[in-house]
Image (cartoon, rainbow, N blue to C red):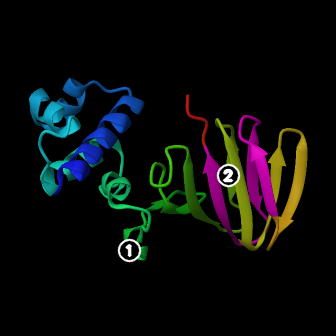
Amino acid sequence: MDRQASDQIGFRIRDVRKKNGLTMSQLADRVGVSYITIYRIETGKVSPSVVLLSGIAHSLGEPINAFFERAQGKCILIKSEDQPEIHANKLNLKLLIPKSLIDDSISISIGRAKKGKCIDRHKNNGFEMSYIIKGKCLFKYGNEEHEMKKGDVIYFEGKTVHSVFALEPLEFLAIYFREIK
């Protein structure tokens, strides 16, 4: 690995660590290495092994490739088998573009819900955009209700309480634009 790529990976690890509110010592403890090892990686003085980088990524809740994409350039391919899936009782999400791949504030996913399933009332910082690929749903936003079907798009501020109820089996594309403070 060249010096510039090593520096960029180290800087990226430091950024993610700080955003997670961790000190270098805390990250070192989680990974099982010394403080000085984390320091040397973050400052680009050494390049971590794949095993160590995997441990750091896991401890920070990031896919290992999140530290490489920024260092490698503009064309990024994420194979289907490398796209993480989150299965919950009410919703299945496939993370197409994880947070930090494009930018720390943007993530893109495909969501699927069975008829009658609901994404409970919630709110978050930033904005969201959803495109209905198939099915129908009832989208509640504050006191508003919107019935959506295939081809419909909605864009909204996430700070307002919102929820989704699948009127039919539902598939949608979601883009999240998080507020970074």
- Whole-angstrom CA distance, mark 1 to mark 2, is 25 Å
Q: Residue at x 27, y 24 (%)?
A: 23
Q: Which residue is mark 2?
A: 119
Establish if 34 lies above or below 63.
above
Q: Residue at x 14, y 35 (%)?
A: 40
Could you tell me residue 55's position as x and y percent?
20, 47
Could you tell me residue 4's position as x and y percent?
24, 49
Query: Number of callouts in the render?
Result: 2
Q: CB of mark 1 within 8 Å of CB of mark 2?
A: no
| Image: magenta residue range | 153-177
Quarter assignment of residue 21: top left
Relative to 55, 163 lies left or right: right
Neighbour class for label 2 at 10 Å: few (<14), some, many (≥20)? some
Q: Which residue is mark 1?
A: 81
Could you tell me residue 43's position as x and y percent?
21, 34
Amino acid type of the residue tagged 1 in the rendering: Glu
